[in-house]
Amino acid sequence: MEQGTALFAEGLSLLDPNDHDRPSQLGGWSVAQLIAHVNSNARALVNLTVWARTGVETPMYPSDDRRAQDIEEGSKQPLVGLIEDCFSSSREFSQSITSLPDEKLDYRVKSARGRDIPVSEAVWIRIREVWIHAVDLGVGIEFSRFPNELQQALLDDVVLSFAVRSDPPQLELIANDVSEAWRTTESADATKVEGSQAGILAWLLGRSNGQGLRCGTPDGKPPTLPPWL
């Protein structure tokens, strides 16, 4: 988490004030909205630690509408203020989760999507947030910068999220550079997609159209995927 926070901070350092309203690489979001979202996420995860510490139900967000409103309001700050708030909110969550007593780490809370999780899983949620959105800043940070073990963990996560759906995309994924493979289905009709581990990850996360991947479709292009979250 600390490494991802540092990478996100590296991305922030490459921005200039004119980037405030520039589209990020997350569709429909400006750079300012993206940073405000990351800041909001940190404080929402603090809520989960409060829930675990006190036993009083404290959801990540009061409602989806309030979450969207807070992000929109936060994005109106100048870029320098957003960046300062990013450092502050990241510290708040780090201090809050690391100060939880060990016996509280298995305390059950709910994610923003209503999943029942141990509060310790908030760390993984934050890891995903800072690493992936560092790419979304659009300053040249690529998935190839991610450590191999993180790429694999993210692939495991995304593939599982597809596999448990009632109508999952039928995929067999082969990362030739690391000799690893994943499947979203046991069907023999799965579409085979091959390429680098980072390239497959970028495509699965919707940050790439699959350029550079090889696919067993009539046109050789990977299929269009639904959102992974």
Image: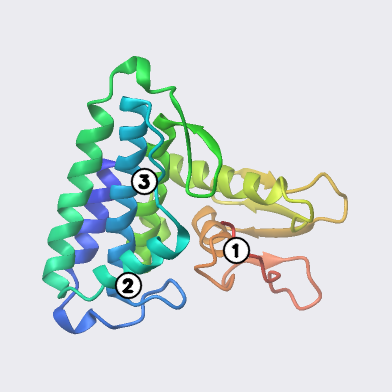
Question: How far is mark 1 from mark 2, CA to CA?
Answer: 22 Å
Visible residue check, residue 151 = yes
Visible residue check, residue 137 = no
Residue depicted at x 30% and y 83%: 22
Sequence-first tag of 1 and 3: 3
Question: How far is mark 1 from mark 3, CA to CA?
Answer: 19 Å
Q: Could you tell me which quadrant the N terminus lies in?
A: top left
Q: What kind of element bears circle 1?
A: loop
Dot 3: within a 10 Å radius of its alpha carbon, few (fewer than 14), some, or many (20 or more) residues? Answer: many
Res. 209 image quadrant: bottom right
In the rendered view, does 176 fall on the left or right side of 151? right
Name the foreground residue: 58 vs 180: 58
Q: What residue type is labelled 2?
A: Glu
Q: Residue 72 carries which label?
A: 2
Residue 140 lies, in percent from the top left, at 31, 70
Res. 189 image quadrant: bottom right
Question: How far is mark 2 from mark 3, CA to CA?
Answer: 20 Å
Q: Could you tell me which quadrant the C terminus lies in?
A: bottom right
Q: What residue type is labelled 1?
A: Pro
Q: Mark 1 points at which residue?
A: 227
Residue depicted at x 61% and y 66%: 213
Residue 8 lies, in percent from the top left, at 26, 57
Q: Which mark is residue 126?
A: 3
